[in-house]
Image (spheres, helix red, strand yellow):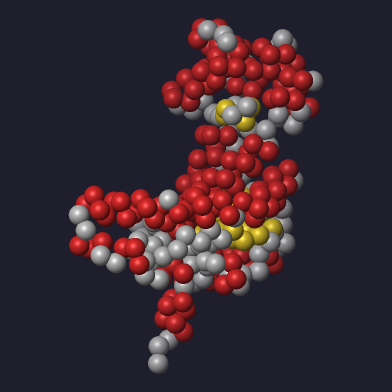
Amino acid sequence: MSPPLFDTLAQLATEQRNPHSMTIDDASVEEALHVINAEDHLVPIAVRREIPYIAAAVRLIVNAFAEGGRLLYVGAGTSGRLGVVDASECPPTFGTSPDMVQGLIAGGKEAVFRSREGVEDVESAGADALEAVGVASCDVVCGIAASSRTPYVLGALAHARARGCATLFVTCAPRPSVDVPVDVAMCPVVGPEVIMGSTRMKSGTAQKLVLNMLTTVSMIQRGKVYENMMVDLQMTSQKLEERSKRTVMMVTDLSYEEASALLARAEGHVKTALVMHLAAVDAGDARQRLAAADGFVRDAIGA
């Protein structure tokens, strides 16, 4: 008689064989790549079907940010690494504190660079990870698990609910099979992987797309974007410094030298520089306008 876990794995959507890749081991390089690419085309379609749920999740995140809460991703393996990546990209892109969006991975930081598969099986470790970052009721906890069954993630979500947090779940299991009590589940079903069980492929791509949407739209709703440009980025590298100047130039039609001088008067803050120029005010007035407009450049200019 097979053990329960064996039977569970056998039923998971992510553990089925893909009929379109049955002979990939005998395919040419080009043929194998075409098979993978054809399957990858299914991913954005699956994500698009989940937009109503992703929208509901974004609203919870935006509300949490407004109340001083954080977005805490929790995952293991590929799923955990995707959460860490998305969280780490928010500060340079949107000028946020590193604490505002965090990625927690089973096994800790070492697991980001070297696989530690067994650590995902400890359910209490998910709760411990949340406690280590001081989880509070104003936070949103987002579990990420392609299969929907990772104990580390389920333990974290259960603990978050007990703490009064809003909870989200990103999984590639079909919605009817997801028996995890959360506020919003996002379930892009991408079908069997090209290589059976290799959820770093289509499942990982789907999860990455969802996480991109969660943080990007949440940050837009928090005034981090003007038109379709990043305006709260941090000038922490030469690339970001030049991007800041280019953004100011594109919005204001100023020359490179003029944009550089304007940013200098704005102490390197793109938002302030834009409001200064477009509303014809000094740096102090621009900051006051932005504060009154909750950081939204468009509203600060209109004021």
Say which of 291 and 134 sits in front: 291
The number of numbered badges drawn on the structure is: 0
Q: Quadrant of residue 302?
A: top right
Say which of 226 and 257 sits in front: 226
Q: Is residue 11 above or below residue 216?
A: below
Res. 261 in view:
no
Q: Quadrant of residue 200?
A: bottom left
Say which of 198 and 138 sits in front: 198
Q: Quadrant of residue 192?
A: bottom left
Q: Position of residue 43 (x, y in %)?
A: 47, 53
Residue that appears at 53% across and 45% down: 212
Q: Is residue 245 above or below residue 6?
A: above
Quadrant placement of the C terminus = top right
Q: Is residue 199 above or below residue 8?
A: above
Q: Residue furthest bottom?
A: 1
Q: Position of residue 201 (x, y in %)?
A: 39, 56
Lateral position of residue 218 relative to residue 302, left or right? left
Q: Position of residue 207 (x, y in %)?
A: 50, 54
Say which of 284 and 25 sits in front: 25
Residue that appears at 72% across and 13% down: 279
Residue that appears at 53% across and 12% down: 260
Q: Position of residue 28 (x, y in %)?
A: 20, 54
Residue that appears at 60% across and 21% down: 270
Res. 197 in view:
yes
Quadrant placement of the N terminus = bottom left
